[in-house]
Structure formats: C-alpha cells, structure tokens
C-alpha cells in the first residue's frame, strides 16, 4: 500500500489503525453469536486477514485490521462487552500500545522488550498456519528465528496457527525470503510489515486482506464443501 493510499484510507475510515487478534471458545464456524455481537459493536468497514491468501481464517480465530477515530483505550472499551465471549483477544497499534484479555499479555510483553531496545519501534507481524500433520507447532514456529534478526516473540496462538511479532524495519517480502528455508513445516506464512507491506509464501496469492462492510453485513466464517472456512457477509 502506498503512502497516498494509506492517507486516503485514513480520511475515509479513520486516522488510527489497530489490529485485533481474537480466539473463539469453539470452532469459528460455530461462533455465529459471538461474531454478530462483535460486528455490531464495530459497525464500520474492517479488513479481515486471509492467512492463506484466500478468504479464510484459522480454525478458532481471526485477525482484523480496524481503522477509526478512537484511541486504543476507547476502542478496547467499545469492544470489551462482545470480546468477553471470546477465549482470548488482543488489540494493538503496531507501535507500542496494546490492550489484552485477562491472563494474556504477550503483545504487551513484546512491546515492553522492544522499547527497551530503543526507538524507533517498527514491528512486523508473522502469521503462521500449520498443516494438519504438524505435531509440534511451537517448535515449528521457533525454527523461524534462525533465519531472522531482531527481537522475535510469540504474540498469540490458534489451534492451527501462531502469530509472531518481530522488531524490524525490513520489508515483508525480504523477511519472507529470509524465512524460506525454515517454513517447510508450515502450510503458509503471511507477513505484514510496519509500513503495511505484505507477503505470503503461497506464491499464487498476493493480497492477504479482505474488506468487509459491517454497516450492512456481519462477520461470518462459513464451511464450504471443501472443508475450508470463508469470511464475508452473512447474506
């Protein structure tokens, strides 16, 4: 995304940009009530992360990119009631501030450690998806660190994936190239860098964000005949 695109987007959707990580207590396809409550509280255009390069998500969670005029504290307060129905959640701005569900402090820990290393604080987010055959996801996630430089810590987890935060100004495509030897155990690796650049290890896909209109629709992750989950309107 170019600077001009980002400025234009901020004028339409709101100048502040936040990321929401959310994990459901049941499989995502069975969490319709929780998703409806969250969509109703947001009531705006949001971007859904498609971690496989298609409009899908993990089995029990998802990531949203939210633009708005609110401060992070105001957004967290707005979303707290619907998010109480989730197993865990985290909201952050990518540059040092976070709010998280009780008992979850991994994103705040990353920002604390990164700040100790000095400013500017630039963060890349690595979204990992594991194959069904992977028996040790944590070891597979840790293997990525051998090819990357900078503070790198786990930030969130799903049944079939992890989110890792990396302190770096390196572009997403460059991070992906450095990771190629370590991603054999992953189904897919998607990356968003500090400048909203993105990269994905499944080469035929490029855009990993899908805009959803929550004024008129809701969040929904449907199970298709192929067994894959999709996000979009509820009809």
Image (cartoon, helix red, strand yellow):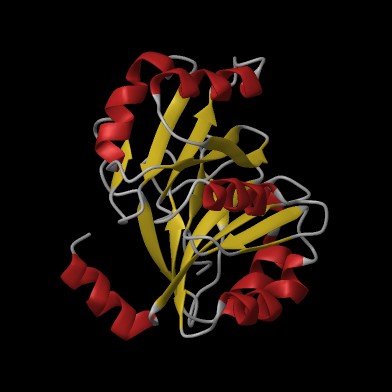
Query: Which residue is located at x 24 percent, y 33 percent?
Result: 204
Question: The N terminus lies in which quarter of the figure?
Answer: bottom left
| Horizontal side of residue 184 vs 197, given as left or right | right
Q: Position of residue 197 (x, y in %)?
A: 28, 50
Q: Position of residue 207 (x, y in %)?
A: 29, 49
Seen in the picture, residue 88 relative to 43 is either above or below; the reply is: above
Query: Which residue is located at x 66 percent, y 14 percent?
Result: 135
Seen in the picture, residue 217 relative to 199 is either above or below; the reply is: below
Q: Position of residue 28 (x, y in %)?
A: 66, 49
Q: Nearer the viewer, residue 156 or 227?
A: 156
On the question of residue 40 being in view, the answer is no
On the question of residue 222 being in view, the answer is yes
Q: Position of residue 133 (x, y in %)?
A: 59, 14
Seen in the picture, residue 160 relative to 123 is either above or below; the reply is: above
Q: Quadrant of residue 46?
A: bottom left
Q: For the image shown, how many numbered marks are present on the structure?
A: 0
């Amino acid at each position: 995304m170019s600077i001009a695109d980002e400025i234009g987007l901020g004028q339409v959707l709101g100048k502040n940009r936040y990321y929401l990580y959310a994990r459901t207590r049941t499989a995502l396809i069975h969490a319709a009530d929780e998703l409806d409550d969250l969509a109703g509280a947001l009531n705006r255009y949001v971007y859904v992360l498609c971690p496989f390069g298609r409009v899908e998500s993990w089995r029990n969670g998802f990531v949203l990119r939210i633009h708005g005029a609110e401060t992070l504290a105001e957004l967290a307060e707005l979303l707290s009631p619907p998010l109480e129905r989730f197993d865990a959640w985290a909201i952050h701005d990518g540059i040092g501030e976070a709010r998280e569900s009780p008992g979850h402090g991994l994103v705040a820990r990353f920002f604390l450690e990164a700040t100790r290393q000095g400013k500017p604080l630039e963060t890349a987010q690595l979204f990992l998806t594991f194959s069904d055959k992977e028996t040790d996801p944590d070891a597979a996630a840790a293997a990525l660190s051998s090819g990357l430089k900078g503070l790198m810590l786990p930030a969130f987890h799903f049944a079939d994936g992890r989110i890792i935060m990396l302190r770096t100004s390196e572009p997403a495509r460059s991070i992906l190239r450095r990771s190629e030897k370590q991603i054999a155990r992953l189904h897919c690796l998607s990356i968003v860098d500090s400048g909203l650049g993105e990269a994905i290890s499944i080469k035929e896909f490029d855009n990993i964000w899908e805009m959803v209109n929550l004024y008129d629709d809701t969040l929904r992750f449907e199970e298709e005949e192929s067994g894959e989950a999709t996000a979009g309107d509820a009809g």
